[in-house]
Amino acid sequence: MNVIIVGAGIAGLSLSVRLALQGHTVTVFEAAPGPGGKLSELRNGGYRFDRGPSLFTMPQYVNALFELAGKNPEDHFQYKQLDCLCHYFYADGSRFRSYADREQMRNELQQVLQTDPDAFFSYLEKSRKIYDLIGSLFMEQSLDPGNFINGKTLRALLHLPVYGLNSTMHDTHEKMFSDKRLVQYFDRYATYNGSDPYQAPAMLRIIPHIEHGIGAYFPVKGMYAITESIYNLALELGVKFQFNTAVDEITVSGKRATGVRCGTVTHTADVVVSNMDITPTYRKLLPHVPHPEKLLQQEKSSSALVFYWGIAHSFPELGLHNIFFAADYKAEFTSIFRDKKLFADPTVYINITSKENAADAPAGGENWFVMINVPRHEGQNWDEEKRKARAFILEKLRKHLHTDPEPFIETEDSWTPQGIEQLTSSAGGSLYGNSSNSKYAAFLRQRNQSKSIPNLYFCGGSVHPGGGIPLCLLSAQITAGLIEKNVPQ
Ligand code: FAD
């Protein structure tokens, strides 16, 4: 079959590999000059930055593509497991590092944070059990009701109250930890898919297990190597890419997608897949078909304001991942999700890949990716917000690092929610599609196959099973499975 994919984000790329291996002729139309979407890179004056994602988990889903193609993944994509997961700085001045190794983590909790390690590990054990119970159920299959009417789902549903899964993440953490710093530590995992721990269901407690139990990784050449390696594999398999080519419409006749229109040129296809965010897919590319209004109007995940600073200095107290917490976490999330405003004391995340890959910065320097969570773009003046955010961030860093980083900023770039929307088409620049602030969110995402147009499919972070690299790779896997199942015999 002749398949057209709209968008060369990580889901579109990996789907192109899977479909080429199924024997289809695949063409990917991409509006940008190159592949990757949010998972692309930026270079400025000797510094290299990963533009979006910085935390890499579940590398097996990247490996799976090479294995499927009969190749040894290590020959094409190298990564290592992280010992130190993150450096944490709390508003009260305490700081600690989290580790993958249990003994190192136990020592750090006891000796540095002077807190109870047993409560911490018992939480992680429950996180593992919840992951085993519901992880594959929601992540690895399509949202067809048939997939959920079985003993495994029933068992999972019966266990929901046992694990307190009807409550919010934050309420659960409040009950489990007397140390407020651990409450904040585990609350932060809600932000891994752009949600608010004060609203998000305790189901998201599977996320700490993914980082602590399964592991956090670093691609040795940086996150962009994920895009590059899958893109190269797709080229080897004969996938055709048309860059700088925005699709303006998915053409439909009756109940069939017939292809795409780019400007005045139409391209026909037997199957069309959109890797573009689901909201603009409907609003811009499918203006004449009925829109799933309820789904499109659901609350979106948070967005980000990112500064890319080339720092002509070295900060030994920082690692690959660093978090500087807000003093009032609840007020920060209220500001992002309810008031839709920049918060004056934001939690600051700094990712420094040159700590692992020295080539990412000139000698003696560091490449700082500095990010805060902010509301999605709804008409704010981002130049003004950026100016304020920069001042808030620098003030916080001066306090914690006892050094002013500002004079060391040698190069500077930034990415606002409006910029994220402009560059990747994601609605309001939200990072992960719809938010997971409701316990029904997992069931309310766009399915991977259109109900009304059966040869139209969707993959990527705004559709099932959700945002983030591993889930995008799984959405490609699910979509490829559906297409294979529906190939006319
Ligand atoms: P996208 O990356 O959204 O790409 C869609 C592509 O479609 C783009 O290339 C766009 O140009 C193209 N396109 C859109 N419209 C058209 C059109 N009409 N015609 C042709 N092409 C079109 N995830 C993690 O796992 N870990 C993290 O640490 C993490 N941090 C993040 C930090 C930031 C700042 C951001 C922005 C995201 C982060 N994420 C993280 C989320 C992750 O990046 C996304 O979930 C994932 O990359 C989305 O991939 P996708 O396949 O949905 O496509």
Image (spheres, grey):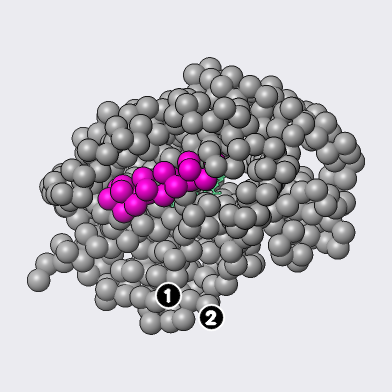
Q: Residue at x 24, y 52 (%)?
A: 142
Disc 2 element: helix
Disc 1 element: helix
Which amino acid type is shown beneath numbered disc 2?
Asp
Please say whether residue 445 is one of the residues in the magenta stretch.
no
Q: Earlier in the sequence, mark 1 or mark 2?
A: 1
Q: Residue at x 48, y 76 (%)?
A: 73
As drawn, 344 above or below 251: above
Q: Depth check: 128 or 369 in front? A: 128
Q: CA distance from mark 1 to mark 2?
A: 9 Å
Q: Could you say which quadrant of the image residue 166 lies in?
A: top left
Q: Could you say which quadrant of the image residue 336 lies in?
A: top right
x and y, in percent, of residue 386 in the image: 69, 30
Q: Disc 1 designates what residue?
A: 66
Mark 1: few/some/many CA within 10 Å (<14, 14-19, 20+): many
x and y, in percent, of residue 294 in the image: 27, 28
Which amino acid type is shown beneath numbered disc 1?
Phe
x and y, in percent, of residue 11 in the image: 41, 57
Please say whether residue 134 is one of the residues in the magenta stretch.
yes
Range of magenta residues: 120-138
Q: Disc 2 designates what residue?
A: 75
Q: Does the residue tagged 2 have its C-beta within 8 Å of any atom of ligand 1?
A: no
